[in-house]
Amino acid sequence: MLFRQHQPPLPTIAALWRRASASATEALLGYRQSDGHWVFELEADRTIPAEYVLLRHYLGEPVDATLEAKIANYLLPDTGRPWRLAAGA
């Protein structure tokens, strides 16, 4: 028979969830302004302008070539990013 060392019981999923939830709550409350509101930067990837162009074409709206050229110039340097996001990288 193998000698087993006494180990404390592993925390349950519920205990881990409570600890993570309390930690996240504390972190968020630390960002709260004195009057009770929060302010965070809004961050979006390049899918929003790409979807805007697609939607305008889908709806049959007139093509704004100047605007689409600006959006294309914005999108082109980062063409691989959405795939990296999807792959979890």
Image (cartoon, rainbow, N blue to C red):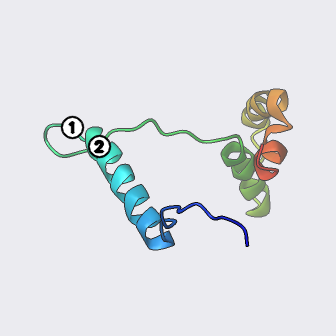
Viewer-proximal residue among 30 and 61:
30
Residue at 72 percent of width and 34 percent of height: 67
Mark 2 or mark 1, which is nearer the start of the sequence? 1
Is residue 79 or residue 35 the one in the foreground?
Answer: 35
Residue 12 coordinates in the image, percent (x, y): 48, 71
Q: Residue at x 69, y 43 (%)?
A: 49
Q: Is residue 18 left or right of residue 79?
A: left
Which residue lies under the disc numbered 2?
38
Residue beneath the point at 79% across and 56% down = 57
Which amino acid type is marked by label 2?
A: Trp
Badge 1, how many Cα within 10 Å: few under 14, some, many 20+? few
Vertical arrangement, residue 60 with respect to residue 49, above or below:
below
The amino acid at mark 1 is: Gln
Residue 61 percent across, percent down from the top left: 73, 56
Determine contact: label 1, label 2, CB under 8 Å: yes
Q: Classify 10 Å Cα crowding around label 2: few (below 14), some (14-19), many (20 and above).
A: few
Residue at 73% of width from left, 73% of height from top? 1
Q: Left or right of 43: which side holds 88? A: right
In the rendered image, the residue lying farthest to the left is: 35
Dot 1 falls on a residue whose secondary structure is loop
Using the numbered discs, state the Cα–Cα distance from disc 1 to disc 2 in whole angstroms: 6 Å
Disc 2 element: loop
Quadrant including the C terminus: top right
**Label ID, residue 33:** 1
Can residue 61 be seen? no
Residue 29 horizontal/vertical position (percent): 27, 46
For the image, the number of numbered tags is 2
Residue nearer the viewer, 22 or 32 = 22
Q: Position of residue 48 (x, y in %)?
A: 66, 47
Left or right: 21, with 50 as reference point: left
